[in-house]
Amino acid sequence: NAGVTQTPKFRILKIGQSMTLQCTQDMNHNYMYWYRQDPGMGLKLIYYSVGAGITDKGEVPNGYNVSRSTTEDFPLRLELAAPSQTSVYFCASSYSSQGEAFFGQGTRLTVV
Amino acid sequence: GQNIDQPTEMTATEGAIVQINCTYQTSGFNGLFWYQQHAGEAPTFLSYNVLDGLEEKGRFSSFLSRSKGYSYLLLKELQMKDSASYLCAALDSNYQLIWGAGTKLIIKP
């Protein structure tokens, strides 16, 4: 079982560049999430989705965008990358809001 | 505001028992999660408590007191592979997870 697949694993961006982090899950989960994790900090929710066609902002959405055209895919778009977006990004999915979340392997992003 | 507090780092000896505490303040409460995260890896689910009391799952147990806004994760018969960060997260009234910064557990032989 693939679970949650997240790409790329590593990326270096220059200030002002854009990129898309890909996330796909094969567990037919309705709930999907994007988090960022900074050293010494808890996971911060960027965006989440409760089903195809439905997305909503989390705690730290500025500078990011998402879409959810299918149940499986939940890409995260970074526009005009800034050094403050240097972080580790995790995609996750769950069957319900009170259910176990399954995480992708993470993307280590550096903006220089 | 919403807040999760847990110790930054703990050290324990192989074969011993360790208790990692977590206190939470959230707007509403719909349960508490514990996740394990090895360095450089993704978090993996350990437990979910929504009712008061102790839930045991092999060497790991999790306790919740809703009235005190308190939970702990108990790890028994510690093994070297238990060296990891342990993340506490509370589900608020909007069913959003509020995450603690994690407790780094160091196991010594």
Image (tube, rainbow, N blue to C red):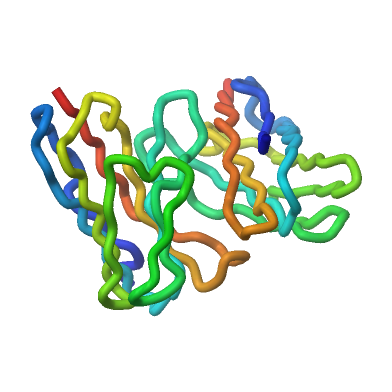
- Position above or below: A43 against B107: below
Place of residue A77 in the rendered image (x, y in percent of width and height, measured from the top left): 21, 51
Q: Quadrant of residue A18?
A: top left
In the rendered view, tell whether residue B38 sits above or below residue A83: below
User: What residue do we see at 48% from left, 67% from top?
Assistant: A94
Q: Is residue B57 left or right of residue A40?
A: right
Q: Nearer the viewer, residue B39 or B97?
A: B97
- Determine whether, in the image, residue A96 is placed left or right of residue A11: right
Residue in the picture at 88% in, 40% down = B68
- Asked whether, in this view, residue B40 is left or right of residue A40, the answer is left
Quarter of the image where the N terminus of chain B is located: top right
Looking at the image, is A98 positioned above or below residue A105?
Answer: below
Residue B49: image x %, image y %? 74, 57
User: Which quarter of the figure is the C terminus of chain B placed in?
Assistant: top right
Q: Position of residue B82 (x, y in %)?
A: 55, 37
Q: Is residue B108 left or right of residue B39?
A: right
Is B38 or A61 nearer to us in this picture?
A: A61
* Residue found at x 40% / y 47%: A46
Could you say which is closer to the camera, residue A6 or residue B95? B95
